[in-house]
Amino acid sequence: MKKHLVIGITGGIAAYKALDVVSRFKKLGFTFDVIMTNNACKFVTPLSFQTISGNDVITDMFSEIRTWEVEHIELSKKADAFVIVPATANFIGKVASGIADDMLTTAVMAAKCPIILVPSMNTNMYENQIFQQNLIKLRESGFHVIEPEEGLLACGDYGKGKLPDPEVIVDNTLEILNRSHEEKDLMGKKMLITAGPTVEAIDPVRYITNHSSGKMGYALAEAAHKRGAEVVLISGPVSLKCKDGIKKIEIKSTQEMFEAVNKFFLWADVVIKAAAPSDFRPEIIQNHKIKKNGSALDIKLTQNPDILMELGKKKGNKILVGFAAETDHVTQHAREKIIKKNLDFIVANNIKEAGAGFKGDTNIIEIIESNGNTTQYDMKSKWEVANIILDKVKMYTVE
Ligand code: PMT
């Protein structure tokens, strides 16, 4: 079935490259409406887009009545996706703040379909904290972002902010469209997902834990649930709430996680271990608060079970996915874990890298498969990462 896009052009120097993007979509048989902001019209004329697209270009909310429907609502209803190329800091700031003061921001606000932002700007603007917070806010609200590339920018600076090649923009859009049209593509699958840290008591007051917030595992559980899978989420102590419809089992220690995972292992078709279980626990848990006595305190630690390794021993035809939280030689250590734990694939993240690993809303991953195939991904929201992992799981579950 032919797809209909709304292409939004905002006022950046890369606006001229959107002509190529529109032309490529046209060759692929897409139909579209093009909306240009006032500032975009200062960089490229609406006539150029009109000529390439063969359609009128919408530039003004109140110019002339093209349809008897409320136009921005009508545009949003018939679109299969919005692609905003380039998306300026100003546009992203407005949408993140709920401002709808022209045709494009108004139509975006009314849209229920996937909205794909292709930011492009000076690298300092791109790295600006306020801009990055706006981007995270939109990612969390379900917007898709095609990351800019690093290179020599129009302003003469070198850095991240360059509009990706039109081919990359089109390929990413197709991928997002395919995904969003298979909403319930994991229907019938039973997924066991772990998330968060574990805590290992030292005494009634103190414990050993790590920085996991549970965000990666919860994103996986929610994305799998949204895509139709039946989900059991085994979660360490985190402050996140989980969506109705997901069966959540709360645990504290690695031993408790081990027991809960074992209980549901037979039931599951797919196990994804995004949790960060503690590898060690105090050999003895004191039942009273340990008092200071002026000297150092030695706590003897004993090893916890490696849950994933134990599952690997009885894997059968289940899909087993691990994570690898590494600080160096990421790919090499992750490959070793695939073999040691008998996994189908592993998701490696370098927890020392900015924007990856613990706590944040984004991650930078590399998926390494047992057959040696390796794919690296740019920084993406944990929600997007979750869907990439689920896409990979789906490839393994196709009979
Ligand atoms: O929770 P967030 O703040 O969103 O952070 C996400 C994350 C960094 C926790 C996540 O992306 C991640 O990397 N999770 C795995 C953390 C970890 O324990 O990595 P590891 O390399 O030590 O363990 C390898 C695999 O074995 C993991 O799948 C882990 O769940 C599992 N494991 C580890 C130890 C253990 N005793 N039992 C296990 O099953």
Image: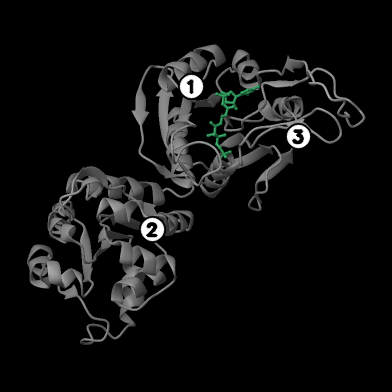
Mark 3 belongs to which amino acid? Lys
Q: Nearer the viewer, mark 2 or mark 3?
A: 2
Disc 2 CB within 8 Å of nearest ligand 1 atom: no
Q: How far separated are the C-alphas under marks 1 and 3?
A: 27 Å
Residue for point 85% across, 30% down: 203
Q: How far separated are the C-alphas under marks 1 and 2?
A: 38 Å
Where does the image place residue 316, in percent across and percent down from the top left? 58, 17
Residue for point 29% across, 86% down: 68
Residue designated by label 1: 344
Mark 2 belongs to which amino acid? Phe
Could you classify mark 1 by the number of other residues whose Cα lies within 10 Å: few (under 14), some (14-19), or many (20 or more)? many
Q: Secondary structure at mark 2?
A: helix
Could you classify mark 3 by the number of other residues whose Cα lies within 10 Å: few (under 14), some (14-19), or many (20 or more)? some
State the quadrant of the N terminus: bottom left
CB atoms at circles 1 and 2 under 8 Å apart? no
Residue designated by label 2: 131
Q: Is residue 359 left or right of residue 36?
A: right
State the quadrant of the C terminus: top left
Name the residue nearer the viewer: 53 or 161: 161
Q: Secondary structure at mark 1?
A: loop
Quadrant assignment for ligand 1: top right
The circle on residue 252 is 3
Where does the image place residue 231, in percent across and percent down from the top left? 62, 41
Q: How far separated are the C-alphas under marks 2 and 3?
A: 37 Å
Any part of residue 55 in sight: no
Q: Compared with residue 375, is residue 355 higher up or lower down, i.e. above or below?
A: below
Q: Secondary structure at mark 3?
A: loop
